[in-house]
Image (tube, helix red, strand yellow):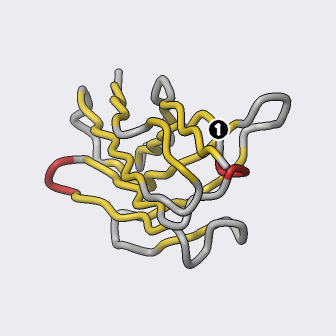
Amino acid sequence: QVQLVESGGGLVQAGGSLRLSCAASGTRFTINVMGWYRQAPGKQRELVATITRGGITNYADSVKVRFTISRDNAKNTVYLQMNSLKPEDTAVYYCNADLFIGNSYWGQGTQVTVSS
């Protein structure tokens, strides 16, 4: 069973920055894709950004340029640097990890609130 522990959420003013971290543990299998998703109140969970083990990234159009995803394979950790935050970025942010064997795991979520 893979455990994903997120950290770094909080309250920030519009235009500010936050850095989210997510550390994976509990698996002997190699993690393929890691990513961040978010869910705002009353909305469906949506993709924010993903990164493959080889470093190929994918971003939602709404966060391109402002957010940067990165990972440390040795530490099984993925990061999300969020700059120029907007009130519409307010959501619970979830970490996801997909193993090469096909299993997918989610973190418990971390709240990001951007005040105007």
Give the residue pinned by disc 1: 91
- Please name the amino acid that badge 1 sits on: Ala
Foreground residue among 6 and 27: 6
- Residue extending farthest to the bottom is 65
Tell me the residue at 47%/45% (across/down).
98
Q: Position of residue 50 (x, y in %)?
A: 52, 60
Q: Position of residue 103 (x, y in %)?
A: 49, 35
Classify 10 Å Cα crowding around label 1: few (below 14), some (14-19), many (20 and above). Answer: many
The reply, left or right, for residue 102 in relation to residue 74 is: right
Foreground residue among 113 and 55: 113
The vertical placement of 29 against 73, above or below, is above
The reply, left or right, for residue 73 in relation to residue 48 is: left
Tell me the residue at 54%/67% (across/down).
84
Label 1: state its secondary structure: strand
The vertical placement of 99 against 28, above or below, is below
- Residue extending farthest to the left is 74
Q: Position of residue 62 (x, y in %)?
A: 71, 67
Q: Position of residue 68 (x, y in %)?
A: 44, 68
Using the rendered view, name the quadrant where residue 70 is placed. Answer: bottom left
The quarter in which the N terminus is drawn is top left
The reply, left or right, for residue 14 in relation to residue 39 is: left
